[in-house]
């Protein structure tokens, strides 16, 4: 897989939060590692900046968001040669004319990246179309969340489809670009050992957690209208669920993989009516302590409505109605201001049917396979072994499936992988239109019921693992969350 040269990457929202934190650092790292052919990066911005001011903003962003060891003067100098500022207002037609004058010939490998709110997507597509900037080899990346419910997502899909063919549209979910997610596919589909066990016969349940220690930060204007269900659950968590639960695709090709993911989404047991309160927990953080510092409650964060009903935490018990997963619950949770930043998929195997050993703690015996996506990426198998010495004492042990030598290679950031793939035209790790809609179809009844409810999300103390109801969700089934696996 290679990127056709010369490429042109146009970042709409080119100096916004996402561009500064993720997209420009990722492009710099690809450049530094010699993975980019000849090509230019255009950052759109409404601000009238000199080239020097523009470069200074990018440089500051790189200093903050690129690992120190990768910041090299020479790479920066050559990287600046790729950077162009496109001063434009996305809602103004003239801006697109200005952009068309900046861009090179039409036959270039051109990628438009919409790092803006999804309410602007149609507008940008129209602007590009009116200036004849959409060619058969142009591609477009759409950031999440796309829409705020099924209907709005359907409308956005339909309007983008007026300008771009589905094969030109790359709906990004950066969790799919994380190294361990791809490793999960390799472990599942390149080893017969795991795949034979990957079903209701051997697996008791699966937990997927994305926890953040940070609060809403400076994004209240966005987040207070969105909440954890739309920001994290509808996309990142459900995508991790799909990769974990899907059937083996026939090939490692975009549609083969996406066909299998969409089947999982279609097989999700709907959660509606009274089942919503039984199976889904929503919470909102209260004041507490995070990283040793006192932090305010969500409702007191700058930019948040004082009576905000927005959830900053969601946990749910999800079931998949098919042969492989019948009776195996998937417990999913995500939240801000939790005890620590972590992301893990933990596969809990069933206990042995009968133990011949004296056990101190019953649950030390069940095997677990842990895929840790962050902060330290890796895979661990939790087994039992004999404690050295007299007697036959059993103790749990961790088998790391990432030997130390793997750690010497820098793990690429998710956006590096995904930007490279989009520029190279590989859509395997991007969502198709039907996947997006199925995910919304499943979360819609939950969101509507919350909107109708006057009950406030359950408060939880910042720096803890979320509301008590989330603990209860598993306790009812005689299980516990893996807090520190
Ligand atoms: C984004 C959400 O998609 O993912 C943010 O909008 C969240 O709210 C972020 O903080 C988390 O990503 P990561 O890769 O840092 O876990």
Image (cartoon, grey):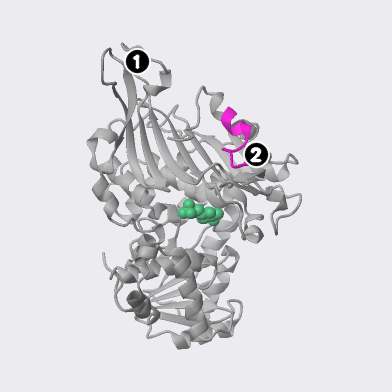
Q: Earlier in the sequence, mark 1 or mark 2?
A: 1
Q: Quadrant of residue 104?
A: bottom left
Residue 23 colored magenta? no
The residue at 52%/82% (across/down) is 53
Q: Quadrant of the C terminus?
A: top left
Q: Which residue is mark 2?
A: 460
Closer to us: 226 or 358: 358
User: Element at badge 1?
Assistant: loop
Segment colored magenta = 462-472
Answer few, some or many: residues within 10 Å of disc 1's Cα (few below 14, many 20 plus, some between 14 and 19).
few
Q: Quadrant of the N terminus?
A: bottom left
Q: Are marks 1 and 2 in contact (CB under 8 Å)?
A: no
The residue at 34%/81% (across/down) is 107
216 relative to 104, above or below: above
427 relative to 311, above or below: below
User: Element at badge 2?
Assistant: strand
Q: Residue furthest bottom?
A: 101
Q: Which residue is mark 1?
A: 353
Question: Which of the numbered marks, if any, corresponds to residue 218?
Answer: none
């Amino acid at each position: 897989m290679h990127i056709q040269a010369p490429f042109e990457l146009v970042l709409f929202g080119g100096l916004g939060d996402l561009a500064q934190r993720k997209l420009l650092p990722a492009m710099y790292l690809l450049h530094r590692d010699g993975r980019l052919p000849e090509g230019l990066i255009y950052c759109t911005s409404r601000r009238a900046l000199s080239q020097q001011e523009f470069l200074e903003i990018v440089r500051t962003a790189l200093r903050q968001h690129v690992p120190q060891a990768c910041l090299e003067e020479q790479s920066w100098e050559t990287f600046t040669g790729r950077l162009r500022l496109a001063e434009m207002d996305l809602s103004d037609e003239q801006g697109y004319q200005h952009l068309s004058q900046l861009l090179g010939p039409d036959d270039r490998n051109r990628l438009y990246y919409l790092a803006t709110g999804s309410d602007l997507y149609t507008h940008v597509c129209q602007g590009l179309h009116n200036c004849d900037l959409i060619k058969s080899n142009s591609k477009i990346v759409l950031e999440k969340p796309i829409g705020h419910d099924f209907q709005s997502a359907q409308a956005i899909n339909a309007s983008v489809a007026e300008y771009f063919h589905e094969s030109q549209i790359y709906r990004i979910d950066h969790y799919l670009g994380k190294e361990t997610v791809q490793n999960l596919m390799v472990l599942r589909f390149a080893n017969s050992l795991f795949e034979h066990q990957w079903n209701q016969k051997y697996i008791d349940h699966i937990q997927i957690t994305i926890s953040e220690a940070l609060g809403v930060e400076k994004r209240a204007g966005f987040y207070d209208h969105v909440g954890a269900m739309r920001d994290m659950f509808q996309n990142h968590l459900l995508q991790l669920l799909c990769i974990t639960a899907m059937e083996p695709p026939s090939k490692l090709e975009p549609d083969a993989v996406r066909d299998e993911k969409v089947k999982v989404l279609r097989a999700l047991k709907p959660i509606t009516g009274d089942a919503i309160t039984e199976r889904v927990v929503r919470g909102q953080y209260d004041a507490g302590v995070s990283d040793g510092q006192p932090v305010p409650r969500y409702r007191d964060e700058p930019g948040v409505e004082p009576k905000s009903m927005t959830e900053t935490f969601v946990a749910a018990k999800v079931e998949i109605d098919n042969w492989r997963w019948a009776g195996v619950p998937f417990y999913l949770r995500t939240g801000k201001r939790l005890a620590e930043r972590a992301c893990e998929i933990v596969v809990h195997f069933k206990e042995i049917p009968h133990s011949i050993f004296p056990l101190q703690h019953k649950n030390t015996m069940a095997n677990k396979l842990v895929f840790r996506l962050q902060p330290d990426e890796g895979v661990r198998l939790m087994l039992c072994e004999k404690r050295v010495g007299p007697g036959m004492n059993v103790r749990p042990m961790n088998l790391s499936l990432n030997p130390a030598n793997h750690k010497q290679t820098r793990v690429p950031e998710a956006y590096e992988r995904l930007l490279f793939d989009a520029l190279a035209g590989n859509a395997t790790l991007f969502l198709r239109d039907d996947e997006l809609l199925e995910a919304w179809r499943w979360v819609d009844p939950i969101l509507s019921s919350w909107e109708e409810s006057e009950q406030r999300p359950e408060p939880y103390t910042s720096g803890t693992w979320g509301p008590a109801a989330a603990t209860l969700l598993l306790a009812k089934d005689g299980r516990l969350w893996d807090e520190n696996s």
